[in-house]
Image (cartoon, rainbow, N blue to C red):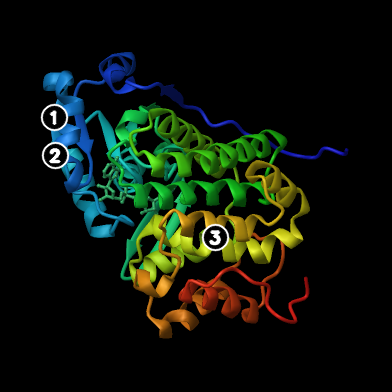
Amino acid sequence: MKHDFVHESRPGRVVFAVGARTRLPEEIDHLGLNNLMVVCTPGQADLAAELTSPLGDKVAELYPHATMHVPVAVASKGIARSREIDADGCIAIGGGSAIGLAKAIAKDTGLPIIALPTTYAGSEMTTVWGLTNAGRKTTGRDPRVLPVTVVYDPQLTVTLPPALSVTSGMNALAHSAEALYAPDCSPITALIAAESARAIASALPRLVADPRDIDARSDALYGAWLAGSALGSTTMSLHHKLCHILGGTFDLPHAETHTAVLPHVLAVNLPAASTARTALETALGTTEPSVHLFHLAQDLGAEMSLKALGMPEDGLQTVIDQTIAAPYANPTPVAEADLHHLLGNALLGAAPTTRPGASQ
Ligand code: NAD
């Protein structure tokens, strides 16, 4: 086999264990931080207060104002507040929304982020930031937004409701799947992505059967860590592009949107990405990864219709126009008719199919 690749490892310290949350004070000491801003969503304020209480007066402020897709106004207020209190670091407790706000603050201020993830979104392993303004989501990369320390404690995910656990897990699987066919996927990233897909797909049915199954939670979070690492090392393709547009334009829920879209994008892309397809077939134990993932998510209770998630039927052309307007990486060119076909299926929650007459 002829190898030809560039691989860049991201810096960052990862502490992973059941009960790892109790190690937060020593991690903060290790970094020498003394005046911290703690960022979370309103719903996780109590948890954030409990997890950071051992830090005592090193916590300058608990800031429970994170919301999904990081609206610019929310980011601006958070940045201003971090300056007012003269924070020297930002602890993000929660899912991608909390980590997203911490990233927006770090992008402007350079504050180091310490993340305690409670979902499988994987943002904590990437240099990608996102901001939403007037229905448009903008993303970019900046090494300053990559958390310096990530404390993964599977016990923090036990309260994640089964439905959100499934869709968040599918969000992570989307990172792994798109990393496998990314133009800059290196051999090490391919190993990480395939192992991630295996771990998540095996964990999801177990944690739905028993949301307190700590081994299943551990496997899912381990897979999410790997998925985030794979996402952080590669260029995103059609799936992430579509989900950014859908989320930003119609304010659709992030993980649920990824779940409804992923099988349809894989139905289009995998025929043109044989190495990725083989890796996913092995990881998932199937010869039809796209159909398999559709039924896995649906059988575990996920909503597979974008319409049911809040997408207006007449919004399809807006998404298609925005997708075509800015170029993106993808293993195969996707015609407007392909986008109509795959988004039409996703809108209705139908199983993925190949468009009649499609070139593949
Ligand atoms: P989220 O952070 O919005 O969390 C969803 C809801 O679940 C919130 O109300 C939250 O309070 C609650 N929640 C989180 N963890 C919980 C737990 N353990 N128990 C009970 N409730 C819990 O959702 P998300 O899917 O994690 O993140 C979505 C956001 O992250 C989007 O804005 C997306 O764009 C961003 N994201 C960014 C990247 C990146 O690399 N930049 C990667 C993935 C996602």
Q: Residues within 10 Å of mark 1 (few under 14, many from 20)?
A: some
Question: Sequence order check: which comes first, mark 2 or mark 1?
Answer: 1
Residue drawn at point x = 56 percent, y = 55 percent? 293
Residue drawn at point x = 37 percent, y = 38 percent? 210
Q: Residues within 10 Å of mark 3 (few under 14, many from 20)?
A: many
**Cα distance in 3D space between marks 2 and 3:** 47 Å
Q: What amino acid type is highlighted by mark number 2?
A: Glu
Q: Is residue 19 left or right of residue 329?
A: left
Foreground residue among 160 and 206: 206
Q: Is residue 276 left or right of residue 40?
A: right
The answer to whether residue 142 is seen in the rendering is no
Is residue 69 positioned above or below 97 on the image? below
Q: Position of residue 270 (x, y in %)?
A: 70, 59
Circle 3 residue: 294
Most extreme residue toward the bottom, as rendered? 314
Q: What amino acid type is highlighted by mark number 1?
A: Ala
SS label for mark 2: helix
What mark, if any, has residue 60 been given in the picture? 1
For marks 3 and 1, give the one nearer the viewer: 3
- Quadrant in the rendering for residue 284: top right
